[in-house]
Amino acid sequence: MSTPIQNYLAACNNNPNPAMISYVANLQQVKEVAPDIAASVVNELENQRRHLKLVASENYCSLNVQAAMGNLLTDKYAEGFPEHRYYGGCVNIDAVENTAAREAEKLFGADYAYVQPHSGADTNLVAYWAILSAKVETPTLEELGVKSLAELTDEQFDMLRKRFGNQKLMGLDYSCGGHLTHGYRMNVSARMFESHPYGVDKETGLLDYDAIEKQAMEVKPLILLTGFSAYPRRIDFKRFRSIADKCGAVLMVDMAHFAGLVAGKVLTGDYDPVKWADIVTTTTHKTLRGPRGAMILCKEEYRDYVNKGCPMVLGGPLGHIMAAKAVAFKEANTQAFQDYAHNVVKNAAALAKECMALGMKLQTGGTENHLMLIDVTSYGLTGKQAEAALFKCGVTANANALPYDKNGAWWTSGIRVGTPGLTTLGMNENDMKEVANIIDLVLKGTKPGLTKEGKPAKGKIDLNEATEKQAKERVQKLLGAHVLYPELDLDFLKKEFVNA
C-alpha cells in the first residue's frame, strides 16, 4: 500500500513543492497514530480558506514558523534561563532562547527580552511579579537586613505577603477596551491588586489623558498600565510616561495587539511603547505574525526580576515555540514586514471609511490602528447575533462590548473587526471596500430569532437565504484571489487525510 508521500510524488510527476513535502510528511506521521487529528488539521486549513479572517487578534504565521514548532526541542526541560538552568543538558535550548531574545531586542530596540512566556495572560503575571519583586520584595529584604526569602521568619514572610497584596494597579477598564488581565474583577489581576480602572470619555470614546493623570495622582498606583484589546486609536506613551513619573508609578504597557505595528515601524516616537515604558508585554501571534506565545521587553533594571519568571509563575519553557519565535522575529526585521505593517493600517482605514459611508457607526468615528468597533444595534442586532450571521456567511469576526455597553460583555452591542489576517493574504484597500459591503449586506439581511413565545432572542438569528447565498459567493471570490498558503494542495490533503 502506497504512502501519502508516495502518492504526492506520483501526483506531481516528481516535481514536488518543498512545503507540500514537509506538510504531507508531517501529517503522514500523525495519521499513523491519530488519523482524526490529521484530518482536523486539514479541515482547519479548509475552514480558514473559506472564511474572511476579521478577528483582530488572529493572523497567519508563515510555514517557516510552523516548521520551527514541530521538532524535538519540545522534549527538553529547561526551567531557569540561559546558562542558569535547573536541569542539565540545556546547551541547545540556551542557544535557541538566546537567539530569540537577541532578535527581539534588535527588532524592538529593547534593553532586554524574556521570550519564555506561553501566553499574554501569563506574561502579564510574570511582569506583575517582577515589578512586585523589584518594588516591594527587594526593599523589604533590605529593611530586614536579609538577602533572600529563605532567611525570613514565618512572621516576616507573612508581613511581606501582606505587602504584596496591598498594592494598586491602574489599567484600562475591560468595558472600555482593556484586557481581562488589566484588573478585571473576574481575573486574578483584580485579586492580586487593588484595581483602579480608568475609562474612556463617554462622548468621544477616547482616552482622556488629563482625567487619567488626575486619577493617577489620587490613586498613586504601584503600576500604571496601558494597552488594549479593543481600542481603535493610537496611545501617547510619552504622555503616559509623564503621568507615571508624576505619580511615582512603574509604567507597564501591554502591546499584545499592536506589537507588529511597533516592529513594522508604524508606531514610532511618542507612540512607541518600548521607548517609554519600564516593562512591555506582548503576545507573538497577533500583528507580529509569529507562533502562539508571548514575551517581555524591559529596561535593564528589571532583567534579573523577569528572568525569575520560572519558578515564580511559569513552568518549563517551550523550546520549540522559542525556536519559532526566533524565526518570526527574523521575518519581522525586514522591509517586507514593514511594508506589511503599514498596509495593515491602510487597509483598516479603508475598511473603516467604507463602513461609515454605508451608515455604520464606528466607535471613536474610525481607527488609527489595525482594528475597529462597529455598533450593530442600528441593525437591530446584538454583537453575538452579528457574529453568528457573519460566520454563517464566511466572515469570522467577534462580538465585542462597546464602552459602557448596556448589553453587557456577553451579548454586546458591537463587533470587533481587524485587518492583520486579510493583509497577510495580500488584500488591499479596494478589497476592504468589498469586505465592508459584505458585512453590511449580511447585517441588513439578518433579523433577531424568536423565542417560543415569539419574542426577539438575543442569541438567535433569522438570516435571509438569498443574502447568505450572495454573501458566500462574494466571500469566496475574494478568497479565491487571495489563497491562504497557496503552496498547499488542499484537494490532495483532503483525499489523503480526510476522505481516505
Image (cartoon, rainbow, N blue to C red):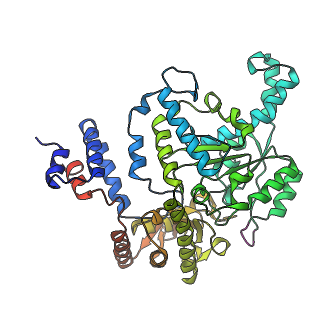
Q: Can residue 59 be seen in this view?
A: yes
Q: In this view, does 82 lie above or below 440?
A: above
Residue 216 percent location from the top left of the image: 84, 53
Q: Can residue 452 be seen in this view?
A: no
Residue 351 percent location from the top left of the image: 53, 74
Q: Does the magenta stretch include residue 257?
A: no
Magenta residue span: 202-206
Q: In this view, does 4 lie above or below 88?
A: below
Residue 1 percent location from the top left of the image: 10, 40
Camera-side residue: 217 or 36? 217
Camera-side residue: 450 or 69? 69
* Number of numbered discs: 0
Picture residue at 56% right of the left edge, 67% below the top:
342
Q: Which quadrant of the structure image shows residue 488?
A: bottom left
Q: Is residue 203 magenta?
A: yes
Most common SS among magenta residues: loop
Picture residue at 85% right of the left edge, 25% below the top:
142
Residue 374 percent location from the top left of the image: 58, 71
Picture residue at 54% right of the left edge, 76% below the top:
350
Picture residue at 59% right of the left edge, 60% below the top:
261
Q: Is residue 258 above or below residue 480?
A: above
From this viewpoint, which residue is outermost toward the left? 1
Q: Determine whether, in the image, residue 190 is placed left or right of residue 313.
A: right
Q: Determine whether, in the image, residue 397 is placed left or right of residue 153.
A: left
